[in-house]
Image (tube, rainbow, N blue to C red):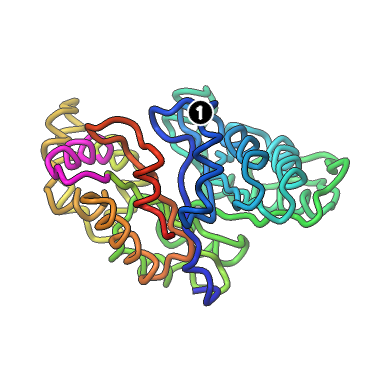
Amino acid sequence: MTDPTATARWGLTIPLIGVPLAEHADVVRALPDFGYTDVWSAETNGADAFTPLTLAAVWEPTLRLGTAIVPVFTRGPALIAMSAAALAAAAPGRFVLGLGASSPVIVGGWNGIEFDRPYQRSRDVLRVVRAALAGERVDGEFDSFTIRRFKLEQAPQPAPRIALAALRGQMLRLAGREADGAILNWLASTDVPQCVNAIGNPDTEVIARIFVCPTDDAEYARAVGRMLISTYLTVPAYAAFHDWLGRGERLAAMHAAWAAGDRAGAAAAIPDDVVDELVVHGSPEACREHVERYAAAGVDTPVLAVLPTAAGPTDLQLLRRLGRS
């Protein structure tokens, strides 16, 4: 771990599923009293990565704000740097820019951009954005693009920390060498040491998004988990990640059904124990204790992604029970 106080961090993914963004003001303001220190956004097919954090910066001036993640393909490096500089200036010292490759579906299927050489693109964007946020002029040819004489009009002080979403050894090592943090996703608490070892730098903050379904109805939680797992872990990068983690054989039937076009069969083929490893469920108190195991294994900042239960969208009472207050 990077810091003896790091386990005091406790994050929440916003926006909450099923809660309109405009109704998050009271939620965000309540979080510090519940023991939360961070809010982190996501960017798939809902809100963009920056807008929820911009609102949160105004609603609650003590929370740390992080993107997890801004895709490196769907915006140019200069635009990423400008957006990051604006949020860092609005919340000095409280913003972490999380970058990542994203996926072929999001980049190519939804945005019409070629998903080519994700490692090189991630590395090049990381380098350009870091230099730009430090106030440097960026000019030159990189492996995945060319930049001509870009310099931020006003670099933020201080420059924000930058984290890189990483799966498997090569990207994890890049995060350890060149980023301030590594963002992990879709892993069990028992997988954390393997990832930390691959990062190889004790000064790199380890951030993990952890899917939490706070319900005692195990069958409901597993049904939700199977749907999500079959959607995410069939993406090539995540499939390779779980092969690397040693879970490939247990997911083979899911992949076979998915390749055959049988989406329902793919979800049904996921064993209960795999769902239980990757989706935290049970009472809110049991979920909180399970998330603590990620911290004990080497995660500096656990970030809860709370899934709706049969009772409806997440409310303040539930967030309090999941918090660290």
Q: Nearer the viewer, residue 262 or 274?
A: 274
| Horizontal side of residue 67 vs 195, given as left or right | right
> Image height check: is 10 above or below 298?
above
| Horizontal side of residue 207 vs 292, given as left or right | right
Amino acid, disc 1 = Glu
Residue 284 image offset from top left, x and y in percent? 28, 51
Residue 166 visible in this rendered orientation of the protein: no
**Magenta region includes residue 216:** yes
Q: Nearer the viewer, residue 102 or 277?
A: 277
**Magenta region includes residue 107:** no
Q: Nearer the viewer, residue 143 or 307?
A: 307
| Horizontal side of residue 130 vs 193, given as left or right | right
> Image height check: is 172 above or below 51?
below
Residue at 60% across, 51% down: 63
Residue at 67% across, 39% down: 58
Q: Nearer the viewer, residue 76 or 292?
A: 292
Residue 303 image offset from top left, x and y in percent? 44, 52
Judging from the image, what secondary structure is the residue with disc 1 in? helix
Q: Pointer 1: what residue?
A: 23
Quarter occupied by the C terminus:
bottom left
Magenta-tinted stretch:
214-229
Quarter location, residue 263? top left
